[in-house]
Image (tube, helix red, strand yellow):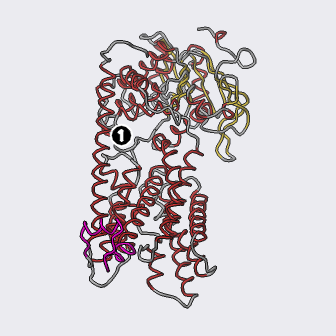
Amino acid sequence: MTPNDIPRSGTTPSRLYARDLRLGYGSHSVVHDLDVVIPDGRITGIVGANACGKSTLLRGLARLLKPTAGTVILDGTDIHRRPTGEVARTLGLLPQQPVVPSGVTVTDLVGRGRYPHQSGFRRWSSEDDAIVAEALDLTGTIDLADRLVDELSGGQRQRVWIAMALAQHTDLLLLDEPTTYLDLAHQIDVLDLLAELNNSRGTTIVMVLHELNLAARYADHLIAMQHGRIRAEGTPDEVITEDIIRDVFGLASRVVLDPVSATPMVLPLSTRRKEAHERLDSRR
Amino acid sequence: MSTVTPTLDPPIVAVRSARRRVARRTTYALSGLTVVWVAVFLVRITQGDFLISLPDAVRIFLGAEIPGASYILMESKLPRAVLGTGVGVALGLAGAIFQTTLHNELASPDIVGVTLGASAAAVFGIVVLGQSGPVISALAVAGALGVALTVRALADGHNGYRLVLLGIGISAVMSAVIQYLFTRVDEFNATKVLQWLGGSLSNVDWRAIGLFFALAVPVVGAIAWRSKVLRVAELGDDLRAGLGAGPGSVDALIALAVILAGLATAVAGPVAFVAFLAGPISRALTGGRTRLVAAALVGAVIVVLGDHIGAYLLGDINLPVGIITGAIGAPALIWLIATGRTARGSR
């Protein structure tokens, strides 16, 4: 994808974008007057140092946080002016640490993703059964259908939460650090699952990610944030550069080509191992 | 999803069987609780120091006049069993709604001061304003809402220990208000003070019971209609909002719970620890799941049984139900705090 594919604000807005967005808690502003456009049908990764405002931006886009200035637009309307049930049928959200209620089975939890599709009169239907079954099947958790969620391992639990988000059947899915607390194998597992979802259903995915090299591999579009502003956005090739990494993380690094995925890969330089780096430099 | 094939996908079969197993467990728990409630109810109206046989009770209900038995059954035993059931259901529902929406076992209306707030307002109405009947109900509901709003404003979004400690502080203030109000009047008597500090079913008549049910039944109906939101409220504020349930839908449910607790208090006083105990006991029976109907039945069983034990445990001494529930609830509270089982759910 070239940068021209991505709709910029002012030209063709996509389904989800924000204008002059300012977000904060009380009088403390965390995200400052930024414009952001989420490309439709793509995977967008939001990266940045701790406390740079990336989770806050995600919460703002998911209408969990009301902007102190500016607007978030979903399908042409201010997201805060639309009925929250209607938004929930379009945009799903997986927070970083959702609460697992006690005594709830996997099937029951995933079934709660159907909540926005059920009204006072329309209760559980066989279509809901089919959608929950499909979500469990896609996430490889169908064998856990009967198990209690609070007895599952971290990796299984994360798959179950994603299954719940799938059952919500939304065109957009926002995830806050979906791979945190997972070992490397389970991180890949979850990201593959999301890539598959994006590929098969065309679901627009936005996720906050900590691991830069995985972000570069799985995201089509990256947003690098620094001090509550966007430092750079574009394809991984455009965003993952030594200059931008130095600005965003305050970290000296080498960026090389990932031999597995042909995407940029960050190799951090350590100040403590300076001599070793210099030795390497002199050998080149 | 329209399919004509009679054989279903294996995943759909797995989902259906998983759902059915949960439903079966809930049905067992609810049936068992219903049987226990009926048994306790029958014990309450037939046993004690004046025994009434079941056939006699049935005969009296059908209009027969049995000297002595008729009066005791219709004016003492039956009204207390009926009101005990109603008050237990109200407090059980209110407690389970509080604990589930606030994600905290300790945040029940009796611990965070809501029922004592209702009680203080009711006592003010009786002692200072000389009121009775519906005015007392209205005052109790206002007192309950007043304390709930105050604690909430002071807790400022912190639903953990801050909310609970604030509630306990306000409870102490409300107890002091109740005791002070009673010292101001001539008819100061210990039984009345006990009723308004801990709850009792002993001074009740059919008029008061009729008023309570007339006001409480619509509130319970509204809760039944709105309770669906608990399924997503349990998942935390972020997912609740993400799944399309705004904060207002939860606030409305909490407000209904506060009103229900206020109505129960207006008629029986702040029966101690019923709201607090009903949730955890019902969850132990439903395999950990929150089911409002189960909490309501547990509340009814606790109050009717507690009233029976209080009336007949110590010979001639008629202990108010609140003393009995308090004696059960206090150790349970200490156990919950000591074992750290206060935070609901896991992350």
Q: Is residue B69 magenta?
A: yes
Q: Which residue is mark 1?
A: A104
The part of the chain drawn in magenta is B51-76
Q: Is residue A121 left or right of residue A132?
A: right
Indicate the amino acid at tag 1. Val
Q: Position of residue A118 (x, y in %)?
A: 50, 32
Q: Is residue A278 above or below residue B91?
A: above
Q: Residue furthest right?
A: A10
* Front-most of residues B43 and B244: B43
* Front-most of residues B247 and A67: B247
Q: Position of residue B170 (x, y in %)?
A: 54, 69
Q: Is residue A29 above or below residue A201?
A: below
* Front-most of residues A184 and B6: B6
Q: Is residue B328 left or right of residue A83?
A: left
Q: Is residue A172 above or below residue B241?
A: above
Mark 1 chain: A
Q: Residue furthest front?
A: B64
Residue at 65% in and 27% down? A230
Q: Is residue B130 magenta?
A: no
- Rendering quarter of residue A283: top left
Q: Is residue B169 visible to us here?
A: no
Q: Which secondary structure type mostly characterizes the magenta part of the structure?
A: helix
Q: Residue furthest bottom?
A: B186
